[in-house]
Image (tube, rainbow, N blue to C red):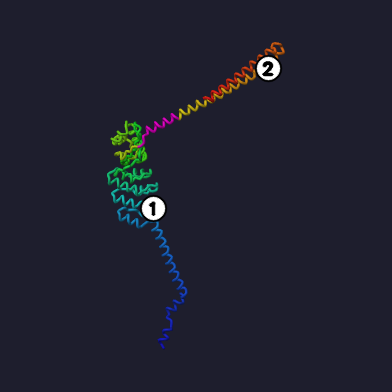
Amino acid sequence: MWCGRSSSRQSPVDSRQTFLFPKDELVDQSTLSLGVVFALIFIAFILLIIFFRFIPVGLWITAWASGVPVSFLTLFGMRFRKVNPSNIVNPLINASKAGLDLNINELEAHYLSGGNVQRVVSALISADKAGIPLSFKQATAIDLAGRDVFEAVQVSVNPKVITTPKVAAMAKDGIQLLALARVTVRANINRLVGGAGEETILARVGEGIVSTIGSASSHKAVLENPDLISKTVLAKGLDAGTAFEILSIDIADVDVGKNIGAELQTDQAEADKRIAQAKAEERRALAVAMEQEFKAEAQNQRSKVIAAEAQIPLAMAEAFRSGNLGVMDYQRYRNVQADTTMRQSIAGQGDANSAQGS
């Protein structure tokens, strides 16, 4: 009984806490503190996301482990300048491992200028290993000029072979030759900016081949000594003003083409024939025109004769009236006229019979 009463009785401390802080207020305080904790955790999570978004910690650790110290402030500033930090830091690490001393600000400035930082650094490393003098300023200038600086260094180390298309040329004997050449070139680093490209090399080599074949007295001489073309063309210094240095010009193939001289002579003869035909046609047309003019003139003269003959009856009438012409005179005139008409008719019939007999 005593135990039951003691268990149901409330202690003075509990009664005092219940009086000061009711149970509902204690629940609200615990809920409020839990919400604040969750809010702080959420804010911290957001801040961590922003931090890791704007500052690539992994890249910073990689740079630090590679011995290329890059500050958080520099990486944070790259984000605001719209620069991908990996495009700057990774090439910087490669350059540092290769023994090159490059400045991160220069790399970033070249990136913002529209250049390819990775290819510039690769070109600098290759040039350094090959012993080719190439500065960072020169490499960036070549890259910004639109040329592949890394490929230029490779071509400078390993020469490049350019195959020309078949060049058609004609020797002095009129025979056409088709020549195919292979040009071995090496990039000239100092002339990459402002120097001409492969198209100019091909054009100059083609021009030299045409000139050499054209100066040959016979196509057989070219076929017997094809190295004559390469020696002559190579001696002209065709690489002047270009971004390459020509090492050799080798004639790979020479084929015999058409007989251009015979074709030209045939064409000339055909042209002369047409000219002669045109001149003959011109003379014929002129003769026809003159014939028509003569016919017109004869018709004109005939009209004059008819007009004059029309005056004869008037004159005869006047002679009858004046007494200068008698009846017997008129009769004799008529007889003479009849005889003339008969002779003309006989003469015309004789011509017709002779024409039929022939």
Q: Position of residue 343 (x, y in %)?
A: 60, 18
Q: Which residue is mark 1?
A: 84
**What's the mark number on residue 119?**
none
On whether residue 258 falls in the magenta region, the answer is: yes
Q: Which residues are magenta?
A: 257-273
Q: Position of residue 31 (x, y in %)?
A: 45, 70
Q: Is residue 220 above or below residue 331?
A: below
| Front: mark 2 or 1 | 2
Amino acid type at mark 1: Asn
Q: Which residue lies most toward the bottom here?
A: 1
On whether residue 226 falls in the magenta region, the answer is: no
What is the crowding at mark 2: few (fewer than 14 residues within 10 Å), some, or many (at least 20)?
few
Residue name at image x 37 percent, y 56 percent: 56
Q: Position of residue 72 (x, y in %)?
A: 36, 55
Q: Which residue is mark 2?
A: 313
Q: Is residue 45 above or below residue 77?
A: below
